[in-house]
Image (cartoon, rainbow, N blue to C red):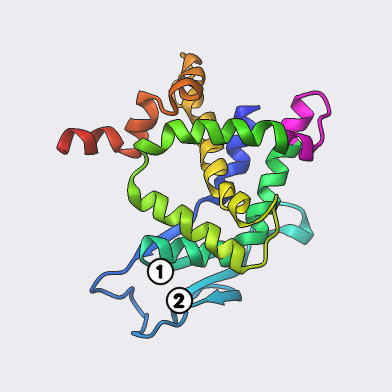
Amino acid sequence: TLRRLTALLIPILWLGCPTDDTDPPGDDDDDLPPDWVIGEVLDTEGPGVVAQVDAPWGPEEDNVLWLTRVQGSHYEMGYQYGRLMGPTIMDLWWTYLGVLGEEMGGVTAEDADFLFGGLLDLAWEHFEPNVPPEFIEEFDGVGDGMEAAGIDYGDGPEDLHKIPRRIITLVDLAMSSMLDPSNLSGMFGFLEDGFTPKLLEWYGIEARRGAA
């Protein structure tokens, strides 16, 4: 199950380009989407843009690949991504829960959301102290962007803002066992502590601690 979920979770990753003194090649100096966009532009949000290109896989009607390009501070990049990809983020969330529900014996995605969402929230509370602050800023931006996109979930914005954190926690839950297949106790260590040495190494957090 965890391997299947990890494969599904890959599309949630995005390319962030923090603002500095050097613009990307071919870009201009305004706050509009870059001039070097590849493919058909589907939507924009400030300098953020999502485009579509043909992909050589999948069913003929779905063989497309979405490219999302965001720019700015960590919060701004998260906001652009949440506003542009909010519906897709929610589609992925319900897809993950559907898979989990099947593995749990035919539980509906809605019931899996109620049962599993709370567990992910508890795991996040343990993991959050080990998360770099720029990640938190991006999660906050994604939540605000999804709210701006008109996404409804749960009882309101507070619940909606849990979605980016739940998804990354689900990724880390899967990776905590997959990074060290010979030791599946990593998964249980993550649930207990909110992190494992393998995850800290993966994100470079252990190295940050050593340099501090």
- Helix, strand or loop at label 1? It is strand
- Is 100 colored magenta in this rendering? yes
| Range of residues picked out in magenta | 99-112
**Rendered-image quadrant of the C terminus:** top left
Does the image show residue 30? yes
**Horizontal and vertical percent for residue 3?**
60, 30
**Rendered-image quadrant of the N terminus:** top right
- Is 127 colored magenta in this rendering? no
Amino acid type of the residue that numbered disc 2 sits on in the rendered structure:
Pro
Dominant secondary-structure state across the stretch colored magenta: helix
Identify the image quadrant of residue 148.
bottom right
* The label number, if any, that marks residue 47 in the structure image: 2
Dot 1 or dot 2, earlier in sequence: 2
Amino acid type of the residue that numbered disc 1 sits on in the rendered structure:
Gln
Residue bearing the label numbered 1:
71
Identify the image quadrant of residue 128.
top left
Does the image show residue 66? no
In the image, 34 versus 196, the foreground residue is: 196
* The label number, if any, that marks residue 183 in the structure image: none
Rendered position, 13 above or below 148: above
**Horizontal and vertical percent for residue 59?**
77, 53
Give the residue drawn at x 73%, y 34%. 112
Marks 1 and 2 in Cβ contact (< 8 Å): yes
Q: CA distance from mark 1 to mark 2?
A: 6 Å
**Horizontal and vertical percent for residue 132?**
33, 45
- Helix, strand or loop at label 2? It is loop
**Horizontal and vertical percent for residue 16?**
41, 60
Q: Is residue 32 left or right of residue 164?
A: left
Identify the image quadrant of residue 114.
top right
In the image, 201 versus 40, the foreground residue is: 201
